Image (cartoon, rainbow, N blue to C red):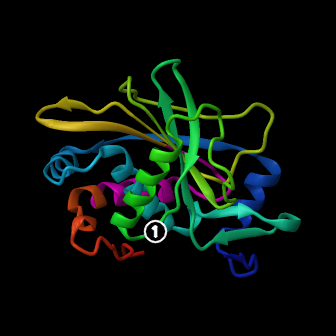
Amino acid sequence: MFHVVDFEKWERREHFKYYTERLKCAYSITANLDVTLFKESLRKNNLKFYPSFIYCVSYNINSMPEFRMRLGENSQLIVYDIVHPNYTIFHKDDHTFSDIWSEYTDDFYKFYDNYKCDMKKYSHIKGVKIKANQPKNFYCISCVPWLTFTGYSTYSSESTPSLMPIITYGKYHEENGKWLMPFTVTISHAVADGYHVSKLINSIQETIDKQSFLVSDGVLTPPDA
């Protein structure tokens, strides 16, 4: 489900018009996340980093309407009620990857089970898109686990910048007793400014620090606006 943005009441209507009609641009912001507490908590709870981190990112993206915007029918700007993560599987034998998506839910343990079921069914299948019926309301997240980078940019030649956020993170490394991990958000300037991306990254850091989703019910409440 989704709702259509009311342009007459939307505070970003002039910004959206400018960045879709006059200056069609996207941008990327890379910052280090401190995953020290997160790694230790996952180790104690015998949980995998990849699905747990995808959940944390998905939870925060779903908490902010700026990252759930898309163009619908008749070029209407819509905001989905929920978006699902589309992530990648790396095949070690031939060094290719496959795209897969899992259904998102605020309940961490249900999402973790969704991920495990999808991995069990699709992880050995080759191809770019290996799970059918990918919903329109998705976003992309992937990892470059072989490299600690300081910047990352994703773009398509001669195309309009996507309103969908593209998330990329890299290899975490130890520095002064902390484990730091590069994290990049790429987004169209039409829907999100530096303020919104900063808020997203800071909220993800807060989520992985508190790890409150690891309580018995596994359900988080949205962060304050």
In which image quadrant can residue 97 be found? top right
In percent of width and height, residue 212 lies at: 23, 67
In percent of width and height, residue 219 lies at: 33, 74
Mark 1 element type: loop
- Residue 27 seen in render: yes
Q: Residue furthest right?
A: 74
Q: In which quarter of the image is the C terminus?
A: bottom left
> In the depicted view, which residue is nearer to us: 94 or 124?
124
In the displayed structure, 30 sits above or below 134; it is above
Which residue does the image show at 73% across and 65% down from the upper left? 14
How many numbered dots are placed on residues in this image? 1
- Residue 166 seen in render: no
Graded by Cα atoms within 10 Å as few (under 14), some (14 to 19) or many (20 or more), the crowding at tag 1 reads: some
Q: Which amino acid does label 1 sit on?
A: Thr
In percent of width and height, residue 82 lies at: 56, 69
In percent of width and height, residue 81 lies at: 59, 74
Q: In which quarter of the image is the N terminus?
A: bottom right
Horizontal side of residue 216 vs 65, given as left or right: left
Which residue does the image show at 43% across and 58% down from the upper left? 200
In the displayed structure, 158 sits above or below 21; it is above
Q: Does the magenta stretch include residue 14?
A: no
Horizontal side of residue 62 vs 46, given as left or right: right
Dot 1 corresponds to which residue?
105
> In the depicted view, which residue is nearer to us: 136 or 203?
136
In which image quadrant can residue 57 be found? bottom left
In the displayed structure, 156 sits above or below 2; it is above
> In the depicted view, which residue is nearer to us: 99 or 2?
99
> In the depicted view, which residue is nearer to us: 107 or 14?
107
Which residue does the image show at 40% across and 29% down from the upper left? 150
Which residue does the image show at 29% across and 33% down from the upper left? 172
Bounds of the magenta span? 185-206
Q: Is residue 187 magenta?
A: yes
